[in-house]
Image: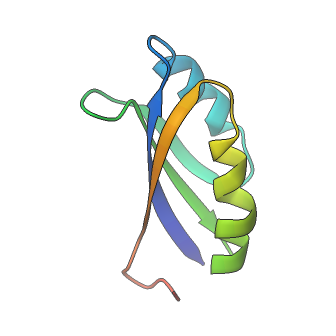
């Protein structure tokens, strides 16, 4: 299992809506809206790095209301 945190910036005032929308996507383990330089933090997971980078991450990035993402793979136990 490969996991990553995605730090997400959204359009102004859309953080809560985006977080709820992302929570229902395949591969999303958790989705929270937060304060600070990023608006939403999502934990994603897949069986392989290829699945994570080829399927899960793009599905999050293509969601409506997202302006920018930063993907941070979890190093502990990840097979990168």
The residue furthest front is: 67
Residue 3 visible somewhere in the drawing: yes
Q: Is residue 70 above or below residue 24?
A: below
In the picture, measured across the screen, residue 2 lies left or right of residue 62, that is left
In the picture, measured across the screen, residue 3 lies left or right of residue 36, that is right
In the picture, measured across the screen, residue 39 lies left or right of residue 60, that is left
Q: Is residue 29 above or below residue 73?
A: above
Residue 18 sits in quarter: top right
Q: Is residue 75 above or below residue 53?
A: below
Q: Is residue 77 above or below residue 42?
A: below
At x 63%, y 36%, the residue is 22
Residue 23 sits in quarter: top right
At x 41%, y 71%, the residue is 74
Residue 48 visible somewhere in the drawing: no
Residue 32 position, x and y percent, is 45, 34
At x 72%, y 43%, the residue is 25
Colour scheme: rainbow
The residue furthest left is: 36
Residue 75 sits in quarter: bottom left
At x 39%, y 30%, the residue is 39
Which quarter of the rendered picture does the N terminus lie within?
bottom right
In the picture, measured across the screen, residue 37 lies left or right of residue 66, that is left
Residue 66 position, x and y percent, is 56, 31
| Nearer to the camera, 4 or 67 | 67
| Nearer to the camera, 11 or 21 | 11
| Nearer to the camera, 30 or 11 | 11
Residue 62 position, x and y percent, is 70, 40
């Amino acid at each position: 299992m490969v996991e990553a945190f995605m730090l997400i910036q959204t359009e102004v005032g859309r953080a809560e809506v985006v977080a709820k929308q992302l929570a229902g996507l395949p591969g999303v383990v958790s989705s929270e809206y937060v304060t600070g330089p990023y608006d939403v933090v999502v934990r994603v997971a897949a069986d392989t790095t290829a699945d994570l980078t080829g399927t899960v991450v793009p599905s999050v990035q293509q969601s409506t209301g997202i302006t920018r993402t930063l993907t941070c793979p979890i190093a502990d136990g990840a097979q990168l």
